[in-house]
Amino acid sequence: MFKQYQAQCEQFISENMKTDLAHDLLHVKRVVKLATLIAEDEQAELNVVLPAAWLHDCVSYPKNHPLRSQSSLHAADKAIVFLRSLDYPQQYLLAIHHAISAHSVSGEIQATSLEAKIVQDADRLDALGAIGVARCIQVSSQLQRPLYSEVDPFSDVRSLDDQQFTLDHFYKKLLRLKDAMNTRLGRSIATQRGQFIENYLQQLATEI
């Protein structure tokens, strides 16, 4: 059923994404692809998962914005207004709102439905692996943060501070995501992608 709404959702998100380089239409399409794979594996309701995946970043404040933690909630509200304008079936709207609201780490809203857990997993998986490394560096470059601390690159002595150094974000957030996955397939993909990041960091250590 959702297929008839997909083109409109894609157009809407492409017009409404105004944030950092790592949160663009390509990111959305990757999340949709991952969410579809996991939803099919879990036999979840695609009429909830797919619109939530497409619209999850229709509001996304920059990393250093004071309203950053409210991005997902504001996105959920905006998405529902849009879906109502399309006469999207009413019975799915509450579940879609929750799935979008709960997808963000910074929002700290617990995902309670299977569909919300799937969208959350899909979004977090895009922060891991080769694409995760690239996206992290993209955002940090925009914020003009150096790659690492010259004195203590891997935070052996000092406390982690990903507001100051890009490398710290891998340890403070990204490598912890694989332990926060909700679904079987999400955990499997996260393990593989997490290993890639660990290999990257080991290689980086030999070069600096």
Image: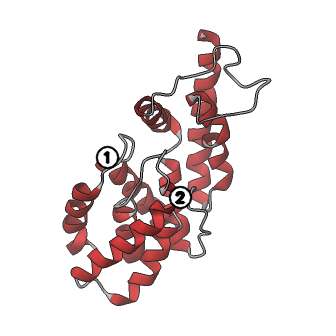
The correct choice, above or below, for 186 with respect to 86 in the image is above
**Distance between mark 1 and mark 2 Cα atoms:** 22 Å
Q: Relative to 102, is 84 on the left or the right?
A: left
Q: Which mark is residue 126?
A: none
- Name the residue: 50% across, 33% down: 133
On the picture, is 125 further left or further right than 176? left
Residue under the image location 34 percent in, 61 percent down: 58
Identified at 63% across, 32% down, the residue is 168
Q: Residue furthest bottom?
A: 91
Circle 2 is placed at which residue position?
Answer: 69
Residue situated furthest top in the rendering:
207
Which secondary structure, mark 2? helix
- Tell me the amino acid under the disc marked 1: Leu
Measured along the vertical axis of the image, is residue 19 above or below residue 59? Answer: above
Q: Which quadrant does the N terminus fall into?
A: bottom left
In this rendered view, identify the residue nearer to me: 110 or 5. 110
Q: Visible in this render: residue 101? A: yes
Location of residue 85 in the rendering, given as x and y in whole percent from the top left corner = 22, 81
Looking at numbered disc 2 in the image, what kind of residue is underneath it? Ser
Expressed as whole percent of the image width and height from the top left, the position of residue 75 reads: 39, 66
Q: Which residue is mark 1?
A: 26
Residue 37 falls left or right of residue 26? right
Label 1 sits on a secondary structure element that is: helix
Image location of residue 154, percent across then percent down: 69, 23
Out of 109 and 195, give the one closest to the viewer: 109
Q: Nearer the viewer, residue 141 or 38?
A: 141
